[in-house]
Image (tube, rainbow, N blue to C red):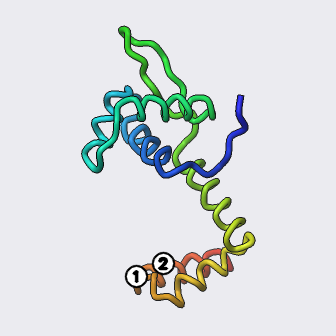
Amino acid sequence: MRTVHPTLTPQELAIMKVVWRSRKTTVRDVYEALRETRPVAYTTVMTMMKILEDKGYLKKTLVDRAHVYQSTKPRQQVLGAMVRDFLDRVFDGAPATLLLHLAKNNKLTGKQRRIVKQLLEEIDE
Protein backbone atom coordinates (compact mmCIF):
# COMPACT_ATOMS: atom_id res chain seq x y z
CA MET A 1 0.00 0.00 0.00
CA ARG A 2 1.17 3.53 -0.77
CA THR A 3 2.06 6.02 1.93
CA VAL A 4 -0.58 8.70 2.32
CA HIS A 5 0.61 12.09 1.17
CA PRO A 6 -1.24 14.93 2.89
CA THR A 7 -1.81 16.93 -0.26
CA LEU A 8 -4.53 15.73 -2.57
CA THR A 9 -4.47 16.53 -6.27
CA PRO A 10 -7.16 18.97 -7.44
CA GLN A 11 -9.18 16.07 -8.91
CA GLU A 12 -8.87 14.04 -5.72
CA LEU A 13 -9.93 17.00 -3.60
CA ALA A 14 -12.98 17.62 -5.81
CA ILE A 15 -14.02 14.00 -5.33
CA MET A 16 -13.43 14.11 -1.58
CA LYS A 17 -15.58 17.25 -1.29
CA VAL A 18 -18.48 15.36 -2.88
CA VAL A 19 -17.91 12.37 -0.59
CA TRP A 20 -17.73 14.57 2.51
CA ARG A 21 -21.02 16.26 1.57
CA SER A 22 -22.79 12.96 0.93
CA ARG A 23 -21.11 10.85 3.64
CA LYS A 24 -21.85 7.66 1.65
CA THR A 25 -21.87 7.74 -2.12
CA THR A 26 -21.35 5.77 -5.31
CA VAL A 27 -19.09 6.43 -8.27
CA ARG A 28 -22.22 7.41 -10.24
CA ASP A 29 -23.20 9.98 -7.59
CA VAL A 30 -19.73 11.54 -7.61
CA TYR A 31 -19.65 11.50 -11.41
CA GLU A 32 -22.99 13.30 -11.63
CA ALA A 33 -21.95 15.89 -9.03
CA LEU A 34 -18.65 16.64 -10.82
CA ARG A 35 -20.35 16.88 -14.22
CA GLU A 36 -22.38 19.83 -12.94
CA THR A 37 -19.23 21.96 -12.94
CA ARG A 38 -17.03 20.43 -15.66
CA PRO A 39 -16.87 17.60 -18.17
CA VAL A 40 -15.43 14.39 -16.74
CA ALA A 41 -15.50 10.75 -17.80
CA TYR A 42 -17.16 8.16 -15.60
CA THR A 43 -14.10 5.90 -15.89
CA THR A 44 -11.86 8.75 -14.71
CA VAL A 45 -13.98 9.21 -11.59
CA MET A 46 -13.94 5.46 -10.97
CA THR A 47 -10.13 5.34 -11.35
CA MET A 48 -9.60 8.35 -9.09
CA MET A 49 -11.84 6.86 -6.41
CA LYS A 50 -9.86 3.61 -6.58
CA ILE A 51 -6.65 5.65 -6.12
CA LEU A 52 -8.20 7.43 -3.12
CA GLU A 53 -9.16 4.04 -1.71
CA ASP A 54 -5.59 2.77 -2.24
CA LYS A 55 -4.24 5.88 -0.51
CA GLY A 56 -6.50 5.25 2.47
CA TYR A 57 -8.87 8.21 2.03
CA LEU A 58 -11.90 6.13 1.00
CA LYS A 59 -13.32 2.75 1.89
CA LYS A 60 -15.98 0.90 -0.05
CA THR A 61 -18.62 -1.62 0.85
CA LEU A 62 -20.90 -3.64 -1.40
CA VAL A 63 -24.56 -2.67 -0.99
CA ASP A 64 -27.15 -4.20 -3.36
CA ARG A 65 -24.58 -4.90 -6.10
CA ALA A 66 -23.18 -1.34 -5.94
CA HIS A 67 -20.02 -0.15 -4.24
CA VAL A 68 -20.74 2.55 -1.69
CA TYR A 69 -17.82 4.76 -0.69
CA GLN A 70 -17.25 6.79 2.43
CA SER A 71 -14.39 8.84 3.73
CA THR A 72 -11.98 7.29 6.20
CA LYS A 73 -10.71 10.70 7.34
CA PRO A 74 -12.68 13.75 8.51
CA ARG A 75 -12.62 16.77 6.23
CA GLN A 76 -10.89 19.01 8.79
CA GLN A 77 -8.11 16.48 9.32
CA VAL A 78 -7.36 16.24 5.59
CA LEU A 79 -7.60 19.98 4.97
CA GLY A 80 -5.45 20.68 8.03
CA ALA A 81 -2.76 18.34 6.72
CA MET A 82 -2.93 20.02 3.31
CA VAL A 83 -2.54 23.48 4.87
CA ARG A 84 0.42 22.31 6.96
CA ASP A 85 2.01 20.77 3.86
CA PHE A 86 1.47 24.02 1.94
CA LEU A 87 2.96 26.08 4.78
CA ASP A 88 5.98 23.80 4.98
CA ARG A 89 6.61 23.78 1.23
CA VAL A 90 5.89 27.42 0.40
CA PHE A 91 6.48 29.38 3.61
CA ASP A 92 9.02 27.15 5.37
CA GLY A 93 6.43 26.31 8.03
CA ALA A 94 5.85 29.94 9.05
CA PRO A 95 2.12 30.78 9.19
CA ALA A 96 2.90 34.42 10.03
CA THR A 97 4.57 34.78 6.65
CA LEU A 98 1.41 33.55 4.95
CA LEU A 99 -0.76 35.96 6.95
CA LEU A 100 1.57 38.85 6.13
CA HIS A 101 1.45 37.92 2.46
CA LEU A 102 -2.35 37.86 2.48
CA ALA A 103 -2.61 41.12 4.42
CA LYS A 104 -0.06 43.00 2.28
CA ASN A 105 -1.69 41.91 -0.97
CA ASN A 106 -5.15 42.97 0.26
CA LYS A 107 -6.44 39.42 0.07
CA LEU A 108 -8.15 39.76 3.45
CA THR A 109 -11.37 41.72 3.77
CA GLY A 110 -11.91 44.04 6.70
CA LYS A 111 -14.10 41.42 8.35
CA GLN A 112 -11.45 38.75 7.86
CA ARG A 113 -8.80 41.04 9.34
CA ARG A 114 -10.98 41.59 12.41
CA ILE A 115 -11.43 37.83 12.78
CA VAL A 116 -7.67 37.24 12.52
CA LYS A 117 -7.05 39.99 15.06
CA GLN A 118 -9.62 38.47 17.42
CA LEU A 119 -8.10 35.00 17.03
CA LEU A 120 -4.62 36.36 17.77
CA GLU A 121 -5.92 38.13 20.87
CA GLU A 122 -7.58 34.89 22.05
CA ILE A 123 -4.30 33.02 21.57
CA ASP A 124 -2.43 35.64 23.62
CA GLU A 125 -4.90 35.30 26.53
What residue type is disc 2 on?
A: Ile
Q: Is residue 87 left or right of residue 33?
A: right
Q: Which mark is residue 111?
A: 1
Q: Name the secondary structure under disc 2.
A: helix
Res 124 → quadrant: bottom right
The residue carrying mark 2 is: 115
Q: Residue at x 72, y 65 (%)?
A: 88
**Quarter in which the N terminus is drawn:** top right
In the picture as drawn, the residue positioned furthest to the top comes out as 64
Taking depth in this image into account, of 99 and 118 the one nearest to the observer is 99
Image quadrant where residue 94 sits: bottom right
For label 2, the crowd category at 10 Å Cα-Cα, with few meaning under 14, some 14 to 19 and many 20 or more, is few
Residue 6 versus residue 26 in the image, above or below: below
Depth check: give the residue in front, 87 or 51: 51
- CA distance separating discs 1 and 2: 6 Å
Question: Residue sitting at 51 percent across and 34 percent down?
Answer: 71
Q: Is residue 60 left or right of residue 43?
A: right
| Secondary element type, mark 1 | helix
Q: The disc labelled 1 sits on which kind of residue?
A: Lys
Query: Residue 24 in the image: x percent, y percent?
Result: 41, 29
**Dots 1, 2 in contact, CB < 8 A:** yes
